[in-house]
Amino acid sequence: MIKLLWNLIWHRLLGRFQQFLKYCVGGGLAFVTDAGLLFVFTEYCGVWYLFSATLSFLAAAVVNYSFQYFITFKGHGGELKKQFTTFVIIAAVGLLINNSLLYIQVEWLGLWYMLAKAIAAGVVLIWNFFMNKYVTFNGN
């Protein structure tokens, strides 16, 4: 009985960890998109870093949603249009967190905007994972 209980708990924890790892891979692809476009828009197009961050974040949100929908959560949790709308709302809050942290780190702490982006992305990753897992994809 104890072994059965242990196996159930272990497989449930392992499954959640694997799901989080998949989420991180998708988030990593989104981060590369986000950071790459942020750098290109800011350095090569001369766009203000916060506006660049907004544009790059939106592009990354599409990459992230696609990966999470098809790979991490396998389309679970409801209708595609409703899920995408929820995902976008959560991403918008993530964008607000992201840009607020960027501004504070760059303007108040004097960090390079790309380093500030990496730090902000770590915070937003946690927000996005839990909100998308339990709200967008209904705990799957």
Image (cartoon, rainbow, N blue to C red):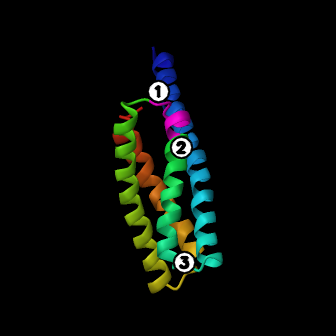
User: Dot 2 corresponds to which residue?
Assistant: 23
Residue 10, relative to residue 97: is it above or below? above
Taking the spot 43% from the left edge, 29% from the top edge, the residue there is: 76
Residue 29, relative to residue 4: is it above or below? below
Separation (CA) of disc 2 from disc 3? 30 Å
The type of residue carrying mark 2 is: Tyr
Residue 11 place in picture, x, y as percent: 52, 26
User: Dot 3 corresponds to which residue?
Assistant: 47
Query: Which is more N-terminal, label 3 or label 2?
Result: 2
Query: Which is more N-terminal, label 3 or label 1?
Result: 1
Residue 37 place in picture, x, y as percent: 60, 65
CA neighbours of label 1 inside 10 A, class few (<14), some (14 to 19), many (20+): few
Labels 2 and 1 touching (C-beta < 8 A): no
Residue 66 place in picture, x, y as percent: 52, 42
Magenta region includes residue 72: yes
Secondary structure under badge 1? Answer: helix
Taking the spot 52% from the left edge, 28% from the top edge, the residue there is: 10
Which numbered marker is on residue 9? 1
